[in-house]
Image (spheres, helix red, strand yellow):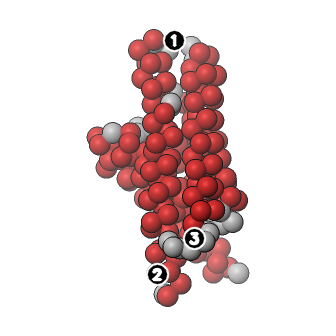
């Protein structure tokens, strides 16, 4: 029992650190690259570590990114990002029954539908929460900042979540197989 807790904590810490390092390294490549990899790491985390590890990383990553200077400029939108990430991993977990099917199996359609639902949910929550609700309430925010943040938290969120989902469908089955063989 104690060993499994140590493994859980270690895996969660490693995936969280990986997520932050990837954001540092890829931020100059733009939102489509960085966001897609972040979403991939969120899904790898939930499908390799489990629901609690995935949720932990989903919640902590935007705060740590903010503290590292690579996250959003306004702290007021961090809770929305944390909840959007959490929705993404929880919906992905429950709609795919906690696994991503091996390519070529009958469950691949279920996995695809679940990950599409998770991607759409994250996108809609971020757009409604940040663009529609939070931005108008942030004191002193400039019109240009509103335009940039609004653009970042609209359709690119759907695209990066879908790309992260596709990458996860390609990678997770092989990671699970490698871990199982070990």
Q: Earlier in the sequence, mark 3 or mark 1?
A: 3
Q: CA distance from mark 2 to mark 1?
A: 51 Å
Which residue matches tag 1? Answer: 140
Q: Earlier in the sequence, mark 3 or mark 2?
A: 3
Residue closest to the far left: 28
Mark 3, mark 1: which one is toward the viewer? 3
Instruction: Reply above or below: 7 against 70.
Output: below
Give the residue drawn at x 63%, y 42%: 121
Instruction: Reply above or below: 19 against 62.
Output: below
Give the residue drawn at x 45%, y 66%: 170
Q: Are marks 3 and 1 in contact (CB under 8 Å)?
A: no
Q: Nearer the viewer, residue 68 or 46?
A: 46
Which residue matches tag 3? Answer: 101
Q: Position of residue 179 (x, y in %)?
A: 50, 80
Assess disc 3: are there few (<14), some (14-19) or many (≥20) residues with their C-alpha within 10 Å of its C-alpha.
many
The image quarter in which residue 114 lies? bottom right
Could you tell whether 156 is left or right of 5 in the image?
left
Give the residue drawn at x 59%, y 62%: 109
Q: CA distance from mark 3 to mark 1?
A: 48 Å
């Amino acid at each position: 029992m104690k060993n499994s807790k140590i493994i859980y904590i270690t895996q969660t810490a490693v995936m969280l650190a990986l997520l932050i390092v990837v954001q540092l390294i890829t931020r100059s490549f733009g939102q489509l690259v960085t966001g897609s990899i972040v979403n991939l790491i969120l899904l790898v985390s939930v499908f390799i570590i489990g629901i609690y590890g995935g949720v932990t990383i989903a919640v902590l990553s935007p705060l740590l990114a903010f503290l590292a200077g690579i996250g959003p400029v306004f702290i007021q939108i961090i809770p929305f990002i944390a909840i959007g990430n959490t929705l993404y991993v929880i919906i992905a977990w429950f709609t795919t029954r906690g696994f991503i099917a091996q390519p070529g199996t009958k469950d691949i359609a279920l996995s695809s539908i679940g990950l599409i639902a998770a991607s759409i949910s994250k996108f809609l929550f971020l757009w409604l929460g940040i663009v529609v609700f939070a931005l108008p309430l942030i004191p002193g925010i400039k019109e240009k900042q509103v335009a940039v943040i609004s653009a970042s938290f609209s359709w690119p969120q759907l695209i990066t979540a879908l790309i992260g989902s596709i990458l996860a469908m390609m990678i997770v089955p092989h990671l699970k197989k490698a871990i199982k063989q070990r």
